[in-house]
Image (tube, rainbow, N blue to C red):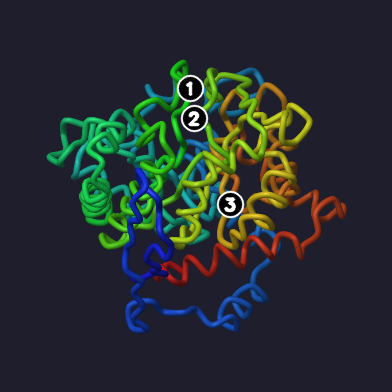
Amino acid sequence: MKQFKLWVLAATLVSGTSVFTSCSSDDDDNPVVPTDEVEAQLRQMTLREKVGQLFYVRPECLDTTIHFNNSGSIDVSSDDIREIKLQAVNATMRGVNEKYPVGGVILYAHNIEDEAQLAAFIPQLRALKGSPLLCIDEEGGRVARIGRNTNFNVETFESMGAIGATGDPKNAYHCGNVIGTYLHRYGFDIDFAPVADVNTNPENIVIGARAFSDDPQVAAPMVTNYLQGLYDAGVTGCIKHFPGHGDTKADTHYGYAQSLKTWSEMLDCEMITFKAGIQWGAQLIMTAHIATPNVTGSDIPATMSPLILQDKLRRELGYENIIITDGMEMGAITQQYNPAEAAVGTLQAGADIVLGPQHFIEAFDAVVKAVEDGVLTEERIDQSVRRILRLKKQMGRA
């Protein structure tokens, strides 16, 4: 697989010492996707095909025979989903997918049994309408869907915090490269890693050792080297969780969480790692569902905030690639918004991809209706689809 490649361009200060990595460019290894190719494909797409590109879903979202609540809809936040172990594409899923194409599919631990099952599942998923990219959370440490599965014989890692504690970014590269190598071998395109958060709050219950460090000057080169390791193995990384989940106490999987930092304070800490990732050439940045009241002046989650996603991330930091949400089935979103509000609202805020909607069909239909009603313009949808198609073409998946 070939895709966009950019080495770290700027010096990162670590304990007062400048650390540089080389700038490398090779036209044969870094194909530029002509704009007219993307535009030609975009012109041929129906509205539903475009909207489908904006959704990255769990396999269970396509199986309407799975019910967890009185409305007859799947509740993918339920622990019961782990008992289903959906590990193959069935006829129901194919039928739903004919009307509801998807841009990507994310697999969780319960979707993966062993190498034989995964080898059969991956091509079934690739055959779905929408040419979905295949994604996974494989950070290393405690978040490793394959690494923690005893049916797979892969190198495992204690934690990113342990790697950060070595002070040697080469160890982060090794981690990313090892993980990227086996993910690529098994057929994945995107790894939702590394964590770019700076774990500055000792009471943080969700990030902790998932972060490389409580010092952004240590974390930044770890993040970019991990990204490079993934890239060199043929897998696209995703830095998360913008604008930083490291200074929180609560877990957004279950409800409201906030950072009380000002933007100035974030620029001196969290933004050091995110800027490094952006300068490296990160293709995806995942949002956090945290509130930042001293930045936005409200309790709105960052995922739903145009100030965070457009004013700060896009305009101030100059990020031009894909913004993907954290899982929209998480409590910090579902306790405040229904699936339709969440999907339409995050696209209005500036996100490109809606990850893991609680009720995919409801969310999909809401986005289509929002365009038909003028709440969202088709031009706005096209902005996101362009970014997604460009990445898919770079990866040879479109």
Q: Nearer the viewer, residue 365 or 16?
A: 16
Q: Position of residue 255 (x, y in %)?
A: 60, 19
Marks 2 and 1, how far apart at CA: 6 Å
Q: Contact (CB < 8 A) between labels 1 and 3?
A: no
Badge 3 amino acid: Ile
In the image, farthest residue toward the front: 16
Q: How many marks?
A: 3
Which element is circle 2 on? loop
Residue at (32, 60) in percent of width and height: 231
Residue at (44, 56) in percent of width and height: 133
Q: Is residue 192 left or right of residue 249?
A: left
Q: Residues within 10 Å of mark 2 (few under 14, many from 20)?
A: many
Q: Position of residue 280 (x, y in %)?
A: 43, 61
Q: Nearer the viewer, residue 32 or 274?
A: 274
Residue at (66, 39) in percent of width and height: 263
| Quarter-of-image position of residue 262 | top right
Badge 1 amino acid: Asn
Which element is circle 1 on? loop
The residue at which mark 1 appears reads as: 201
Q: Nearer the viewer, residue 183 or 174?
A: 174
Q: Position of residue 238 (x, y in %)?
A: 44, 50
Marks 1 and 3, how far apart at CA: 25 Å
Q: Is residue 144 left or right of residue 5?
A: left
Residue 398 visible? The answer is: yes
The residue at which mark 2 appears reads as: 246
- Quadrant where the image shows the N terminus: bottom left
Badge 2 amino acid: Gly
| 385 lies above or below 298 | below
Q: Position of residue 241 (x, y in %)?
A: 51, 39
Which element is circle 3 on? strand
Q: Nearer the viewer, residue 144 or 315?
A: 315
